[in-house]
Amino acid sequence: MLKEKIYWHDTLKTPDAAGAAALPEAADIAVIGAGYTGLSAARAFAKRGLKVAVLEAETVGWGASSRNGGMVLTGLKLGMRTVLKKYGRELAHRLFQSSLRAIDLVEQIVEQDNIECGFARTGHLLAASKPGHYAALGEELEFMAREFNHPLRLVPASEQRNEIGTDAFYGGLVDEVSGGLNPAQYVMGLARAAQAAGAMISERAPVSRLERRPGGFAVQTGRGKINVERVFVATSGYTGRATPSLRKKIIPIGSFIVATERLREDVVKSLSPNSRMMFDSKHYLHYFRFWDQRLIFGGRAAFFPENAATVRRSAEILRQDMLQVFPQLQEARIEYAWGGTLDFAFDTMPHVGEIEGIGFALGYAGHGVALGTYLGQTAAEAMIDGRLADHPFNAASFPGAPFGLYNGWPWFLPFAGLWYRFLDLVE
């Protein structure tokens, strides 16, 4: 029977009381959101001696941090050619190096704080969905080696079964630096690491209002009020009415995942010989990998954020898409289906900064495992040191919608979905 629930949650050994702390009356800083960004920031703030209150509307990791595919990837959502063209060589290099340091930081935190989440640098495979896409991957390999000194490896279609057990693609590109983990185990470990550093985490404390006061803010939550000197927002795709200026800059986009029943070990090995993180080259892309002998298969089956109807419909769509990639799984049962909400900025870039006196880091567009961890820590450190303006992800302006035609409700997503499908047809 299909379980409409998050598979990763069933991998947690015991229910965790990480967010059981009472709401304090005051703190040096309030961190809004207990996902990767907020917890990484809280850990960094606390290590620097600040009294930190993490305010989470639901429970630790409730949002995308425990719902994603667990991929820890190099680069940004926006291709580095585009980044270089838009922002120039110097900033493009700083941004790409940040993406590599982000993976290093995840690895470092996992080791230092003894987080058992299966982190491993198994690399990723970008699979070419069309012959023309494979030609473009060859150009990408040369560009990344020449411009960023970042080695990649091209896999022709004749050799792709050494990487993926299908003939559905036209070759691919391997990046050995990327990795994977169990996202729910990682975010719970990050919460314990933040607490060990001294941060207090209060769950079921949705922030409804931020009121500027002399010397700081009065933060109204569902569990009462807390007075703080500073505020750091880490709400990503769940950014709400308490921070309207940020809400107008973030588009919440639904992403959906299914997980199969446990497959035979030899089947898994034939489908993914090197345990890569895998995704295709489409605009309306799919991403997939294996964990505990299950295929975790996700994509933009629907663009609107998750609810019971979109999860159920997406499970049907993703199963059909899965069989196009791996027809040998025709008899495999889908055991779990769930959805989550990603945060896209209008320029498809992550952003760090301060708006109306409130610090923030968000806009990961599907690269949040590594970048959320990294930007949470580095933005926190920059806020403490008074150098947030120097952060590389604060170097470019944070755009809103053209002509201001957006108030936080993504009415245009169905049209965006149709546009991406059109591009996949004609490219």
Image (cartoon, grey):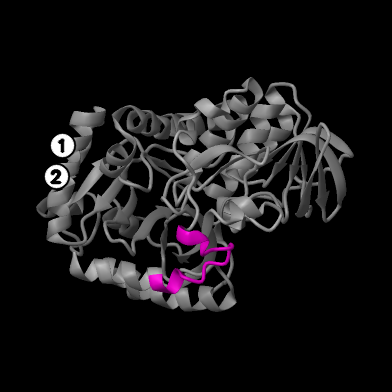
Seen from this angle, which residue lies furthest left? 158
Residue at the image position 37 percent from the left and 57 percent from the top? 288
The Cα–Cα distance between marks 1 and 2, rounded to whole angstroms, is 7 Å
Please provide the residue range marked out in magenta: 402-415
Vertical side of 215 occupied by 58: above or below: below
Q: Which of 222 and 337 is in front in this view?
A: 222
Vertical side of 66 occupied by 336: above or below: below
In which quarter of the view is residue 418 placed?
Answer: bottom left
Is 286 colored magenta in this rendering?
Answer: no
Q: Which of 240 and 401 is in front in this view?
A: 401
Q: How crowded is mark 1: few (under 14 residues within 10 Å), some or many (20 or more)?
A: some
Q: Residue 256: which numbered mark, if any?
A: none
**Amino acid found under the numbered disc labelled 1:** Glu
On screen, residue 192 versus residue 109, left or right, reads right
**Amino acid found under the numbered disc labelled 2:** Gly
**Horizontal and vertical percent position of residue 179:** 40, 40
Vertical side of 4 occupied by 272: above or below: above
On screen, residue 390 versus residue 131, left or right, reads right
Q: Residue 138: which numbered mark, if any?
A: 2
Residue 193 in sight here: no
Residue at the image position 72 percent from the left and 56 percent from the top? 58
Q: How crowded is mark 2: few (under 14 residues within 10 Å), some or many (20 or more)?
A: some
Q: Is mark 1 on a helix, strand or loop?
A: helix
Quadrant where the N terminus sits is: bottom right
Quadrant where the C terminus sits is: bottom left
The residue identified by callout 1 is 142
Q: Nearer the viewer, residue 311 or 117?
A: 311
Whether tag 1 and tag 2 are in contact, CB under 8 A, the answer is yes
**Horizontal and vertical percent position of residue 374:** 52, 34
**Horizontal and vertical percent position of residue 270:** 27, 56
- Callout count: 2
